Amino acid sequence: MFTRAIVKTPCKNMVNGISTANLGKPDDTLPQDQHKGYIDALKKCGLKVTILDSDENFPDSTFIEDVCLITPKCAIITNPGAASRRGETIEISKAIEELDLPVERIQNSGTLDAGDIMMVNDHYFAGLSDRTNIEGASQLNLILKKYGYTSSNITLKSVLHLKTGISYLENNNLLAFGEFLNHPALSVFNLLAVDPDESYAANSVWINGKVLVPMGFSKTNEMIKAAGYQTIEVNVSEFRKLDGGLSCLSLRF
């Protein structure tokens, strides 16, 4: 069960964030409103939410998940694959000081976005992507092993991050689409196949028995409900324009 979350308010300069989505630039004001709705959804799941101030120096910094992985036994500051995001690790390092957890770091030559990391109990899947290289995944493996965890790598073919295409919903249920539907490393899971025209909804978030689902993807929402979950729809359309999904917007622990 999760008890807390850390989020970061989107900055006005978010309109200049990194994107491959070809959906246009985010609106000037809607991201702030949608972010408040996202925080409300986290609170509905029983989480105490810490809200960090926006930072105009880092347009993508609202996607806070990428810069830190918080496990039950340690926090790992990443080394983001996009050079423009590496300065974001300074503030998150300060923000997690009060957690009373050992802090580890991915070092230079290794790159890692935590959007490429999916936790399944005591095992962590690492996606090898344009943002996470083999050196970063290897460093992660050594850190996790130190705390009694295991990890394995999955090479990505077409998605930005691992959790762009899969989401673990607990109870051995895995939301997935495209290249992940027949992946041998995922064959042990009960796959909930996302329709190709709703692929964005593959990034949904399980929190304490509820599942946050992006608004506007009714087939995926109904499939998750049919699997026995209560869903909460959240409008994150402006974050989608920067390749961001629901999981990207918080650290949950």
Image (cartoon, rainbow, N blue to C red):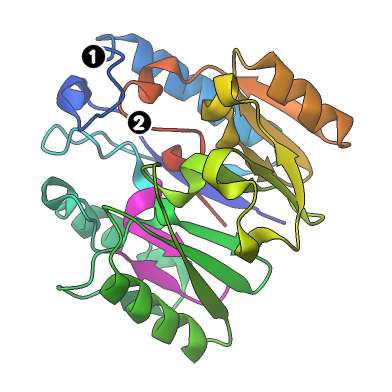
Distance CA(mark 1)–CA(mark 2):
11 Å
Residue drawn at the location 10% of the way across and 37% of the way down: 57
Q: Is residue 71 visible?
A: no
* Quadrant housing residue 196: top right
Q: Is residue 126 left or right of residue 188?
A: left
For mark 1, give the secondary structure: loop
For mark 2, give the secondary structure: loop
The one of 18 and 191 positioned closer to us in this rendering: 191
Range shown magenta: 65-78
Residue where numbered disc 1 is placed? 25
Does 222 sit above or below residue 229?
Answer: above
Residue drawn at the location 35% of the way across and 79% of the way down: 138
Work out whether mark 1 precedes mark 2 in sequence or the reverse, and give the earlier one.
Answer: 1
* Mark 1 burial class by Cα count in 10 Å: few <14, some 14-19, many 20+: some
Q: Residue 157 location, x and y as percent?
A: 40, 49
Q: Quadrant of the N terminus?
A: bottom right
* Quadrant housing residue 29: top left
Q: Residue 200 location, x and y as percent?
A: 51, 27
Q: How many numbered circles does the render carry? A: 2
The numbered disc on residue 243 is 2
Does 152 sit above or below residue 160?
Answer: below
